[in-house]
Amino acid sequence: MIVTTEGPALHITEEEWQERARSCEAFLELHATMGRQTPLTYSEVNSHVSADPGLAPFDFSTDLGRTRIGHLLGLVSQSSQYERGVMLTAIVGYLDPLAQQLGGGFFKMAVKLHRLPARSTKEERDAFWVAEVGRVFAVYGADRRRRKAGR
């Protein structure tokens, strides 16, 4: 796990960021290997990464809370891109199906990781996201199939 705590760290220690990032990545990996191919919500991720005693959930009613969950997911995206070649956080989106499917931070991170052109259209971003979700489930699903086969 590559963790850099540059960002919205107000009152969150480097150790807590690392703990939350490890927990988040493990939770997303587990979900991706289960084979259900359904997205997780920001709220589900928030509940999981704040389940340990002493870790308060991010407050999505504030800009800081939304920035923090975005920063956390960015840390996981960087790590999974480096380790597995996919942005694992593609499988996290909004609870409201009528809302935009995922936050703009995902696409900013995709640009930063040289996975998406900086001047991409909405159609290109949507196509990238759909393809990335498929790639995540393919990569992590292959792990599940290998384990089942005993390899």
Image: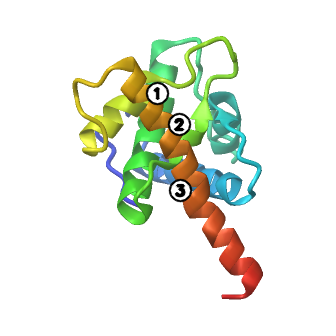
- Measured from the top left, where is residue 119 in percent x and y? 22, 23
Residue at horizontal 53%, vertical 37%? 130
Under mark 3, the amino acid is Arg
Mark 3 and mark 1 lie on one chain; the one further toward the N terminus is 3
What percent of the width, then of the height, locates residue 4? Answer: 32, 49
The numbered disc on residue 22 is 3
Judged from the image, the secondary structure of the residue bearing numbered disc 3 is helix
Secondary structure under tag 2 reads: helix
Instruction: Give the alpha-carbon distance from disc 2 to disc 3, as whole Å.
Output: 25 Å
Question: According to the image, label 1 marks what residue?
Answer: 126
* x then y, percent, for residue 17: 46, 46
Report whether 93 appears left or right of 82.
right
What mark, if any, has residue 130 been given in the picture? Answer: 2
Tell me if mark 1 has few (under 14), some (14-19) or many (20+) residues whose alpha carbon lies within 10 angstroms of its own. some
Q: Amino acid at mark 2?
A: Val
Q: Which of the 4 quarters of the picture holds residue 144?
A: bottom right
- The amino acid beneath tag 1 is Asp
Of the 4 image quadrants, the one containing the N terminus is bottom left
The relative height of residue 31 versus residue 122 in the rendered view (above or below) is below
Above or below residue 51? Residue 139 is below
Split into 4 quadrants, where in the image is the C terminus?
Answer: bottom right
